[in-house]
Amino acid sequence: MDEVKQLVAAIKKGDIKPIYFLMGEEAYYIDKISDFIENNILDEAEKGFNQMVLYGRDVSVDDIVSNAKRYPMMAERQVVIVKEAQDLSRTIEKLASYAENPQPTTVLVVNYKYKKLDKRKALYKAINKSGSVVFESKKLYDNQVPDWIRRVLKGQGYDISPKAAQMLVEFLGTDLSKVNNELDKLKIVLPKGTQITPEHIEENIGISKDFNNFELRKAVGERNIVKAHQIAKYFADNPKDNPMVVTVALLFNFFSQLLHLHGMTDKNPRSVASALRVNPYFVNEYLTAARNYPMKKVSAVIALLREFDVKSKGVGANAVPQGDLLKELLVRILG
């Protein structure tokens, strides 16, 4: 996020580069930077003749170069934006000759989503040598997204509780565009200054605050058999919203962290939060689970989760409903 802010700040100050090659697994920031350039470098009167949007599936690299080499009409510069440029991945290296000597009056923006350039090849080297920008938008890890949500909301005058942020991540995953869309919905109905709570998430997005993977993990950690099976029943009744493969993955990550915790000599809450990369708010949940599951039991549960991960994908359990599989898994973990 800091790199994005610096890049945008430089453009606002007039430090505009001839090429912005935006690549990487996380499409959210690629779109944000590209949209900012599209909306801000030229004024409305200049855009008609001097701003062009191309799509990778419809053009060749030669077409892009041809457009980039044009001179602007009655303006200081022109902007050429290539969206979905990953469709040109087989020929993208042909852009290297242009990148070696880019048109100084053209701003070429290449949106190369879900892929990245080989840094050993000519195109990457040429873009860097010409003083242009190569921006890599990296996918955030699960444990990084709650903090991203908090920072985004803070910048917009909102706050969010740790549990509410965790609920969003577990329901929506690490796709920042999808998460941001849901945050936008919340901002429509909630006034600035609001702290977003699990109740807000449940009322406005439809994620149950009591029956979700986060609460299941907590119930398993506390060895709360009744609560765990109540959640399993809810999942069985709503299988499309609660795929078992996601639940197993979350539990596997949880018990892997417990294994790490058992190996730590310093179990101070701050040290645990840092080592496990979890919000300090959740540390007690991990310490409680570590007391309830000795290291030997944790190792056995991890092996069990590997077995059920395969079964949840249909291997050796084709005729068994996912809900029944989850109930069996919980019996064996909690037994």
Image (tube, rainbow, N blue to C red):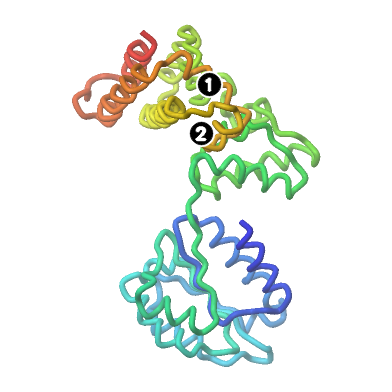
Q: Which residue is mark 2?
A: 170
**Which residue does the image show at 45% across and 87% down from the upper left?**
100
Q: Residue furthest front?
A: 265
Residue 251, position as x, y percentages in the image = 41, 26
Is 51 displayed left or right of 326 in the figure?
Answer: right
Query: What secondary structure is found at the residue carrying circle 1?
Result: helix
Cβ atoms at labels 2 and 1 below 8 Å apart: no
Closer to the camera in the image, 32 or 53: 32
- Quarter of the picture containing the N terminus is bottom right
Q: Find residue 287 and name its label.
A: 1
Query: Along the line of sight, which residue is nearer the eye, 102 or 303?
Result: 303
Cα distance, mark 2 to mark 1?
Answer: 21 Å
Q: Tell which circle, 2 or 1, labels the residue nearer the N-terminal end.
A: 2
Instruction: Give the answer, above or below, for where 9 lies relative to 222.
Output: below
Q: Residue, x 19% and y 25% (percent of image)?
A: 316
231 vs 152, left or right, is left
- Left or right for 310, reference 242: left
